[in-house]
Image (cartoon, rainbow, N blue to C red):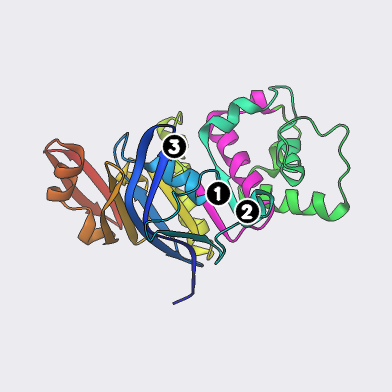
Amino acid sequence: MDAPFFEIRNARVWRGETLALDDFSLSICAGESLAILGPNGAGKSTFLKLLTGEVRAESGRGSECRLFGEELWSLEELRHRIGVVMPEEVARFDPEELAGDAVLSSLRGAYGRTKWMRFSPADRVAAMDAMERMGVANLAKREFGSLSSGERRRFLIARALVHQPEVLVLDEPSTALDFAASLQLSGLLQQLLEDGRALVLVTHHPGEIPPAMNRVVLLDHGKVAADGPKKKILTNERMKELYQVGLKVRWSGGWCEVRPG
């Protein structure tokens, strides 16, 4: 097993005056993929900000938190090592910006137009490669605002991949997508996993977890409620306890389907 790229033990994390994560311990190894699952208010957003270095755990009390083996880190370095895709990023782009420029601008840590930015031939090749992986290279000259929600989400993933990050983090990736786009996205995530890409999927929908992703961590009220292989974690009893409603879990082809029951 590879060394952890993210490791936190016995930690508390505050968001303002709210204790968002309490006595929190979790380790993710380099190259490992997993899903973080939980209802609203479970601590998923705080975990995500902790993982990407935007918030820090409370010091002392025997706690520790390391990213890539370091207790102190540079956000600029992390942006190259961890690619992050969040639904709210869509609103940060000018609708008239070219979709391909949205990918290129990631290389400068920006969301604005690339008119005054300089890019090397290698930069442009990296951006095109990322768009081709997401199947949107043919849309690079389209205005970002003219794309469908599913196409925009693919460009956001290409934007996150352009740095060749060690891990790709996806926060609620199917938000605002219609049924067809959600299915297409699920297939893309499955392909990324099969290609060896390390993913951390943050979601409250068990049905988003690709078959190739086996580890699931359940968060509840700022704590790790369960951690292990998905078929042992995603059970009728655990889902009922987590969401406080009767649910029935069914498996098909490695996909998990949860219905009222």
| Residue 57: % across, % down | 45, 49
Q: Which residue, given by chain and number where applicable, does mark 1 sit on?
A: 53
The quarter of the image holding the N terminus is: bottom left
- Kindly report which numbered mark, 3 or 2, lies closer to the viewer in this rendering: 2
Labels in figure, total? 3
Determine the residue positioned at 81% across, 51% down.
123
Residue 78: give its label: 2
State the separation of the CA atoms marked 3 and 1.
24 Å
Q: Nearer the viewer, residue 46 or 206?
A: 46
Q: Are marks 1 and 2 in contact (CB under 8 Å)?
A: yes
**246 relative position to 88: left or right:** left
Extent of the magenta region: 144-170
Give the image quarter of residue 10: bottom left
Secondary structure at numbered mark 1: loop
Badge 3: how crowded within 10 Å, few (<14), some, or many (20+)? many
**239 relative position to 120: left or right:** left
Q: Which residue, given by chain and number where applicable, does mark 3 sit on?
A: 174
Of label 3 and label 1, which has the lower sequence position? 1
**204 relative position to 92: left or right:** left
State the separation of the CA atoms marked 1 and 2.
7 Å
